[in-house]
Each structure stands twice: as C-alpha cells, then as structure tokens.
C-alpha cells in the first residue's frame, strides 16, 4: 500500500542521545557532555523525582482524562480558568491539539524560517499546508519583526511566533505579538510558543488572553522544569473556546507520571531559579569566551557563527562535546550550544575554541 508522502519530515531528527553517539564512536558515554537539545543540565527538581517514584505504584491505572490538580495549579499560576489549560504530551502534543482545533484540510499555516520544525510537521499531519516568514540576520543579529510576519502573511489560519526563538534566541515583545494579532484576520490564530519563556525575563503573552480570542500560548515542562523525558507541556487558550479541549484531546493526554512530576516541579521555585540563574551566567560566559560571533539569546542556548557548522559539530563531537549543527534549520554556518552546568559550559567553550583555532 502507498503511504502519505511525508518525505520532508526525515530532515527532523530529535537530538541523538549520548549512548548512541558513544556507541558509534566506540567510546564510553561518560566521555560526553550533551549540549545539543536545550535540556536542563541540573536535572529535574528533587521534588519531581520523589513524585515520579511515588507515582510508580499507580501506573497500572489509566490517568484521569484531565489531571485536575495540575490543571488547577497552572490555571491559578496564569490567572485563567481550568478550561483554558490544555495539558498535552509535551509542547509538541499541545501544537497538535491546536492544529486539530483549527485546521481544515488545505488550510495554511505561517511558520518562521529558520525555526522549530515541528510547527510544519504538525500542520502537515493535520492536512494543512505550510508557508514561511523569514527570521533574517541584520546588523544586530537575527531580527524577528511583526513586519516580516505581516509581509509574508496571506490569510493563513495559524501564525506561529516563537518567543524566545529557537535557534536564534531572539524574541518578540508583547506589543509586537499584539501587532501581529491585530493585523491578521479575526479567524487567524496566533500561537505564541514560549517553550523557553522562563529564561526570557519578559511577560508572557498569556496576559493578552484577557482581551483576545485569537492568541494561544504554548508552554512546556521540558526546559526550565527539567522534565523533557516525561513529555509534559500545555497550551493556554482563549476563554471563549469553552470546552473545545474535550473535542480534540487524545484520551489521557498526559501520563500519571508526567502530571505528578509536573505538579511537584511547579512547587519547586528554588529549582527553577537555580536553573534560570545558571542560564543567565552561561549565556554571558559563552558570549564572552567563545571566539566566534555569538548572538544575544533569551533562551537557554546561544547561537554562534562558526563558519562551517557541520565540520565544527563533528570535531566537537569527537572531543566529547555534543552541540547542534544548525544546517537543518537552514543555517549551515551556525551551531547552537545549550547552556550546561559550569563545568559542561566551560568544556564546550574550550573545545569549540580549540576546534575554531585549528
Ligand atoms: N517549541 C520550541 C521552540 C522548542 O524548541 C521545543 C523543543 N525543543 C518545543 C516547542 C517542544 O518541546 P516539548 O515537546 O519537549 O515540550
């Protein structure tokens, strides 16, 4: 039988793990540091780790369709109703729910390029079509502007804004998000992806939902909360959408283990503060110490122009440092380095400077 042609999607491969790379190179996994997937180098909150162990005895039961305690805690955090919080299997799962809620076959979406690949994949899974707006390098680094979005906009059903943006680290201000929402059709949903929001020191676009029903915000537990492996994210959607979640949700949208971990992690401000402080330090350190052009970042990573991303990434890998070659983002000269612990970040900078000096 013929399958759908989703060949564009083979470009997208989530970052490979240390074990896989170590096996390929015939080396010990402990030789490597992984700064290629924007994970939290400090691990999960200790409170979340306890919650995961406790949840272990409950996993013979299906989760509740909606984890009421976690939903309520998030609703309280954001000042919205429980119905406005759509828990999902990672931020990726939340993107799927938003696509399901909005896209009819052949509807178009507008995505940033370079940008996070899953927007386009999710839209295509839902039989949508993808067009692009440019995030371009200007004098001061990569520029994300409402003008660039609106120039490319042609009535698409969904517009994705990533703030902070992966992989450049740039961001939109709230005013800029509002401009896009104001200037696009009433029937266009603006999805503001704040997967890296905790690192940005800027207000969330959730505040816009008080007044608008054409903006939805994506958040995740994968980054600042250190729970990437549990797969937990959510969308905050407009109040007027009512009970739409019940209509789009895959049964049991997030696992018992993920939800208990998320609830515990939400109660551990100290761990989030430790993470965000170390990211602030690490971004500065990489800017100061790396002998390559770096760009201001509001995320937990720094983009750097190293000339030939593929060969630098490969040489760093052989030296035990895994970073992200941004060629698949359409940036063949750039690498993205996640801020690690001090020791990891130090090692990455040393390795890269050595490779760049060769
Ligand atoms: N948005 C952006 C911009 C991302 O970089 C990522 C993950 N790297 C996500 C969303 C989704 O993350 P997750 O599914 O782990 O929540």
Image: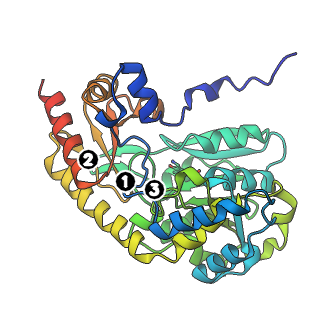
Residue 64 image-quadrant placement: bottom right
Q: Quadrant of the N terminus?
A: top right
Query: Between 17 and 26, which is closer to the camera in this rendering?
Result: 26
Q: Counting residues from the N terminus, which is met first, the one under dot 1 or under dot 3?
A: 1
Q: Quadrant of residue 2?
A: top right
- Nearer the viewer's eye, disc 2 or disc 3? 2
Position of residue 13 measured from the top left corner of the image (x, y, whole percent):
54, 32
For the residues labelled 2 and 3, the Cα–Cα distance comes to: 33 Å
Residue that appears at 66% across and 73% down? 70
Q: Which residue is mark 3?
A: 145
Q: Earlier in the sequence, mark 2 or mark 3?
A: 3
**Of the image marks 2 and 1, the number of the one nearer the N terminus:** 1
Residue 336 locus on image (x, y percent):
35, 41
Q: Is residue 330 above or below residue 114?
A: above
* Callout 2–callout 1 Cβ contact below 8 Å: yes
Say if 188 sits above or below 325 in the image: below
Residue 150 appears anywhere in the view = no
Say whether residue 173 is left or right of residue 4.
left
207 on left or right of 65: left
Residue at left offset 42%, top offset 57%? 43
Q: Residue at x 37, y 55 (%)?
A: 300
Q: How far is mark 1 from mark 3, CA to CA? A: 31 Å
**Residue 223 or 179: which is nearer the viewer?**
223
Q: Which mark is residue 344?
A: 2
Q: Is residue 7 visible?
A: yes
Residue that numbered label 1 is attached to = 41
Is disc 1 surrounded by few (<14), some (14 to 19) or many (20+) residues within 10 Å? Answer: many
């Amino acid at each position: 039988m013929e399958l759908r042609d989703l060949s564009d999607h083979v470009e997208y491969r989530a970052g490979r793990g240390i074990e896989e790379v170590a096996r390929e190179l015939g080396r010990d996994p402990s030789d490597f540091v992984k700064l290629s997937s924007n994970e939290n180098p400090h691990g999960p909150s200790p409170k979340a780790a306890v919650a995961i162990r406790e949840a272990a005895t409950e996993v013979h039961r299906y989760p509740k369709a909606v984890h009421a305690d976690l939903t309520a805690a998030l609703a309280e955090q954001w000042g919205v109703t429980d119905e406005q919080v759509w828990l999902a299997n990672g931020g990726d799962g939340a993107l799927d729910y938003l696509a399901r809620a909005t896209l009819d076959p052949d509807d178009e979406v507008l995505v940033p390029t370079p940008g996070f690949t899953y927007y386009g994949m999710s839209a295509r899974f839902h039989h949508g079509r993808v067009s692009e707006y440019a995030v371009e390098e200007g004098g001061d680094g990569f520029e994300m502007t409402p003008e660039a979005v609106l120039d490319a906009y042609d009535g698409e059903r969904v517009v994705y804004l990533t703030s902070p943006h992966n992989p450049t680290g740039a961001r939109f201000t709230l005013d800029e998000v509002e401009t896009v929402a104001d200037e696009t059709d009433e029937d266009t949903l603006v999805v503001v992806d704040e997967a890296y929001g905790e690192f940005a020191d800027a207000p969330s676009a959730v505040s816009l939902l008080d007044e608008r029903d054409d903006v939805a915000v994506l958040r995740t537990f994968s980054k600042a909360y250190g729970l990437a492996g549990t797969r937990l994210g959510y969308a905050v959607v407009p109040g007027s959408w009512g009970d739409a979640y019940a209509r789009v949700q895959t049964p049991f949208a997030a696992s018992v283990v993920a939800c208990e971990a998320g609830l515990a992690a939400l109660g551990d401000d100290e761990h989030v503060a430790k993470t965000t402080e170390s990211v602030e330090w690490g971004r500065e350190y990489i800017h100061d110490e790396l002998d390559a052009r770096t760009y201001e970042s509001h995320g937990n990573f720094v983009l750097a122009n190293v000339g030939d991303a593929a060969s630098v990434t490969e040489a760093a890998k052989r030296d035990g440092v895994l970073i992200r070659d941004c060629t698949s983002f359409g940036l063949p000269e750039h690498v993205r380095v996640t801020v690690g612990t001090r020791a990891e970040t130090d090692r990455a900078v040393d390795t890269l400077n050595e490779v760049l000096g060769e």
